[in-house]
């Protein structure tokens, strides 16, 4: 009888584990709450070929956001200083300027590109078969600027004047085993500009990628960051073209892998400026 009674009580009484499960919600509710974390993220895992995603926590009103580079949280500022805002505004404006054949400053920039590219050859006119030699699709290069606008001409001119040796090497397709169907140099340059514009997505209201946030910090240090990044991306593109032994029909695939490489380098631990990117050493 005693054993039976004990058995009945054991069945009717909840076990310690059952009590813990029943009481856990109220215990958690009554427990003191920790202070809010300053938007620290879990360690950022970068895959070999992955581009960065769109973190949902980046938004207006945050002083900074943080992400992990090999265990060290780095601060990327979203609220910009007046100087930073002005540089971003100027860059956005540059990206929206269309090439206009009626503007004298645009005509002058096109002539300057020719002079920087072929200093010993006289240009016959802004519409001339000579332009095909540089890698434009026809005799009127203005028709090729429609995709990326005037900034793509500025980028080519910056490349020609700042890194003339690298510019001429890529123009003349020097070095490496070249394909019988090479990419057209000037048109490729316009595509590189457009690729970077898409990657940075500066027209978005909020920073949606780590790459954009990193670049905006670099732009605050150097107002020519976009032009420098363009030069780095161009030499990366040519290097990947050679490594893949690519042909003209594979240009878009090479451009995609170029973007992935640019993104990986921008997010490396020690890359705080464009000049810190490993591929910057390819320029001369």
Image (cartoon, rainbow, N blue to C red):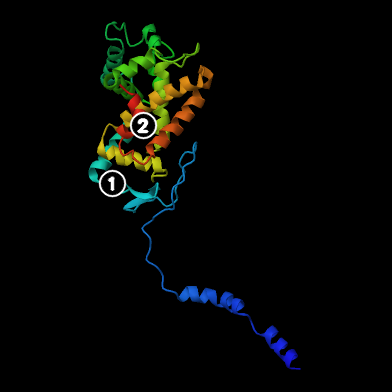
- Left or right relative to 5: residue 195: left
Where residue 282 sits, quadrant-wise, is top left
Residue 2 lies, in percent from the top left, at 73, 93
Q: How many marks?
A: 2
Q: Quadrant of residue 171?
A: top left
Which sits in the foreground, 244 or 123?
Answer: 244
Q: Earlier in the sequence, mark 1 or mark 2?
A: 1
Query: Can the viewer see residue 169 in this picture?
Result: yes
Determine which of the numbered discs, if any, sits on residue 80 in the image: 1
Counting from the top left corner in percent of width and height, residue 21 is at 58, 74
Query: Does 3 appear above or below 95?
Result: below
Please tell me which residue lies in front, 107 or 39.
39
Residue shown at the point (48%, 25%) measured from the top left: 254
Choose top left, top right, bottom left or bottom right for residue 92: top left
In the rendered view, tell whether residue 199 sits above or below residue 169: below
Classify the position of the N terminus by image quarter. bottom right
Q: How would you rate the neighbour count of disc 2 (Cα within 10 Å): few for under 14, some for 14-19, many for 20 or more?
A: some
**Who's the residue at 44% across and 32% down the image?**
261
Residue 39 picture location, percent across and down: 38, 56
Q: Quadrant of the C terminus?
A: top left
Q: Which mark is residue 127?
A: none
Residue position for label 2: 278
Judging depth in this view, the residue of 148 and 199 nearest the camera is: 199
Tag nearer the camera, 1 or 2: 2
Q: State the residue lying farthest toward the front.
A: 3
Observer able to see residue 147: no
Q: What residue is drawn where x is 74% and y is 90%?
A: 3
């Amino acid at each position: 009888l005693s054993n039976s009674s004990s058995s009945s009580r054991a069945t009717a009484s909840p076990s310690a584990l059952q009590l813990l499960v029943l009481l856990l919600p109220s215990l958690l509710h009554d427990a003191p709450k920790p202070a809010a974390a300053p938007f620290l993220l879990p360690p950022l895992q970068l895959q070999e070929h992955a581009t960065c995603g769109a973190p949902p926590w980046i938004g207006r009103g945050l002083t900074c956001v943080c992400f992990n580079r090999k265990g060290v949280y780095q601060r990327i500022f979203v609220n910009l200083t007046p100087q930073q805002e002005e540089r971003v505004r100027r860059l956005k404006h540059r990206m929206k300027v269309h090439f206009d054949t009626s503007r004298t400053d645009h005509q002058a920039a096109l002539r300057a590109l020719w002079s920087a590219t072929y200093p010993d050859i006289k240009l016959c006119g802004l519409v001339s078969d000579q332009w095909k030699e540089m890698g434009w699709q026809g005799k009127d290069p203005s028709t090729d600027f429609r995709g990326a606008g005037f900034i793509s001409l500025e980028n080519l001119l910056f490349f020609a004047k700042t890194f003339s040796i690298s510019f001429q090497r890529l123009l003349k397709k020097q070095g490496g085993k070249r394909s019988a169907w090479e990419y057209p140099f000037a048109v490729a340059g316009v595509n590189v500009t457009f690729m970077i514009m898409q990657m940075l997505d500066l027209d978005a209201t909020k920073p949606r990628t780590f790459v954009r946030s990193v670049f905006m910090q670099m732009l605050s240090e150097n107002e020519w960051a976009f032009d420098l990044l363009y030069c780095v991306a161009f030499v990366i593109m040519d290097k990947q073209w050679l490594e893949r032994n690519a042909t003209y029909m594979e240009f878009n695939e090479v451009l995609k892998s170029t973007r992935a490489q640019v993104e990986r380098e921008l997010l490396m631990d020690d890359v705080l400026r464009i000049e810190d990117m490993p591929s910057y050493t390819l320029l001369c």
